[in-house]
Amino acid sequence: MEEKYFTPEEKKEMLALSRQLLAHTREIQERDDFKRIRHIISDGIKQNHYRRDRYGINPTIHNLNTAMLLCDKISPDRNMIIAILLFNLCKTEFIPTEELVKEWGDDIAKLIRGLLKVSTLYSKQAAVESDNFRKLLLTFAEDIRVIIIMIVDRLALMRTINHHPNEKMVHDVAYESNYLYAPLAHRLGLYAIKSELEDLSLKYTNRKTYTDIAHKLNETKVKRDQYIAEFIKPIREKLDATGLKYEIKGRTKSIYSIWNKLKKQKNDIDHIYDLFAIRIIIDTTTEKEKSDCWLAYSVITDMYQPNPSRMKDWLSIPKSNGYESLHITVYGPGDRWVEVQIRTKRMDLIAEKGLAAHWKYKGIKSEGDLDTWMNNVRDILEAAETGPMELMKNMKMDIYDKEVFVFTPKGDLYKLPLGASLLDFAFHIHSKLGMTCTGGKVNGKNQKLNYKLKSGDTVEILTSTAQAPKLDWLAFVVTSKARNKIRQTVHEMNNRSATLGKELLERRFKNRKIELNESSLMKVIKKLGYKTVTDFYDAIADESLDINNVITEYEGLDKKIPDAAEIRSAEEFQLMTAADDDATSSDVLVIGDDIKGINYRLSKCCNPIYGDDVFGFISAEGVIKIHRHDCPNATNIREKYPYRLITTRWSGKLGQQFGATLRIVGNDDLGIVTSITSIINKERDTSLRSISIDSNDGIFQGFLVVGVNDTVALNNLIKKLKTVKGVKDVQRSK
């Protein structure tokens, strides 16, 4: 069975990987670990429980690659490696949960449960746009080792899929790697993995750009190496004189970061001077780390002129993810700026493999930094009410190269992103403190909520129980925790207020013995100028709108109900009312010889709107019906009744809404209908009147009836709907 399961190339690769993994993990594995795993996997293969995935990827090879990457990029860990190798057999229930715990222990079972939870979400197509994406991240935040395994697993997959025949899969995997896994790797200090994920993502989504930059770097490699040697030579002589033990490396920057610089600077690669960085790694004791780094700094800056504005000191206060280093940019030979990074061997190990990977799963105390980071991720996720894409934007927004460091009156030090306000600080301490914050004292002086913090500030937060979050706070907060919590709280407050307003209105209608009709009320809401029902009820609750005025408007409506014999579908009825309203209350059309004010109707067979090429047709009832020139009935009308046609054009009057029907087709993905309706609701002077969706075999098609002012607004809406991921086609229905 195994002979058929592996191709000859896979068999060779599997044996090589197994030997490498055995060698790398010899010190941490327990007796017979690999022998037991080999027998279990072999049995699983024989019983068809270790199947290839839907893209033909062999799970044995993939999991061995992932385990090797974990050893290479982070550090070997017995439980994580065993979880990676056994995961697929637990997924197919070849290994029952009870047996897993009994044979391998609670910790390995816990890791596999986390991986299974992630796998379940992916089986439901947990794309970035779906709500499962948030659940996926929450699962990550439960155990940092699950994050690490998934990041390394993703890198193994990205290395495998180059030139895979399924281009859509490759694009989707690359897209998700850039938006999810690279930022997570950055937050954990896994910079080497982050850079490779970004490079491969660019390669798979924009291969031409990637190849052009890679070729250019290869062409200039000899010159670059010569320059680095020339730059390093005098530094070596001076450093040798100090007695420091060190090594110097020259490192070319990642293709992805070079591409970003090309975009920002709008320049070509020949004119970007900081394509590489020099790294000085000092071998010293923990007690002498800082003093030896600063000694190397003085040697270099005595030799080359430094740029003070580009100095980054992460020795004195490390980054939030534990990164420690001293970055300086100096003016080197040939009038070129060169970045020099100074760090110790310990710092370099953390920079390469991530601080979190070293302390958390080995039982070493984290001293709070990692736990603070994980708690921050949980806060972001739990407060995220604005959708997954906003969530990811916020997560990326918190990744700053620059930070501000502020103190509490007791002397506790906190790190926040550059640009953080006093209100950001309040939310950073505690959500409740942020929601009741009225201002604060900074260095003993009273300051407002929007005060931008500076490093070294001592901040005391002032609160009031009468304070409540407001949407305009979003204008000056930058942290995702603050933004999400403000949005969530304001949304909840608005809903409570709207509920109260609705109850007040219904009670007053009941007291006046007026029957409340929803469709008539919607006309009143629209007439009074409210964009949403929530805004309308909010206005009643805060007494900015008098209920008596609402009742007056309501009673003034013509509440004629259509005959039972004229019952139509909801869609037809909405189109009919839209057309009839437009026809009876407007001089938007000029018919015949510049005549206005003639009774007409917008034909329901083609639903013309402002801007369409139209003509008039005098029907047998004597009513002029307006048709689009491309109406399905236009050819027949012109051939049979040419004597009944009348020229018609739109006048300059705007501001009315016309009903237009759109046919939409796409993949039946989670959240796609929400994305479509969200775009329509955000469009100015556009309203969604009805929606009808049918789904079959993963494909949906449906009809939307929208109210728009003219063809320009309609065409703009169609363009935006076509950009929704999963939407295949949007056409105006004739």
Image (cartoon, helix red, strand yellow):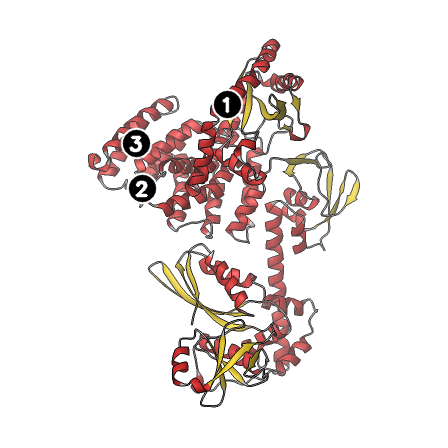
Amino acid type shown at disc 2: Pro
Q: Nearer the viewer, mark 2 or mark 1?
A: 1
- Residue 54: % across, % down: 31, 46
- State the mark number for residue 584: none
Q: Secondary structure at mark 2?
A: loop
- Pointers 2 and 3 in contact (CB under 8 A)? no
Amino acid type shown at disc 3: Ile
> Is residue 356 shown above or below 582?
above
Label 2 crowd bin: few (<14), some (14–19), many (20+), radius 10 Å: few
In percent of the image, x 73 and y 41: which residue is there? 460
**Quarter holding residue 34:** top left
Mark pair 2, 3: CA separation: 15 Å
- State the mark number for residue 223: 1
Q: Is residue 69 visible?
A: yes
Q: Residue furthest bottom?
A: 621
Q: Earlier in the sequence, mark 2 or mark 3?
A: 3
| Lateral position of residue 337 relative to residue 602, left or right | right
Q: Nearer the viewer, residue 578 or 435?
A: 578
| Lateral position of residue 341 relative to residue 730, left or right | right
Q: Secondary structure at mark 3?
A: helix
Identify the residue under disc 2.
Answer: 96
> Is residue 596 shown above or below 97?
below
Q: Earlier in the sequence, mark 3 or mark 1?
A: 3
- Residue 549: % across, % down: 68, 77
Q: Nearer the viewer, residue 568 or 105?
A: 568
Identify the residue under disc 3.
Answer: 37
In percent of the image, x 70 and y 69: which residue is there? 543
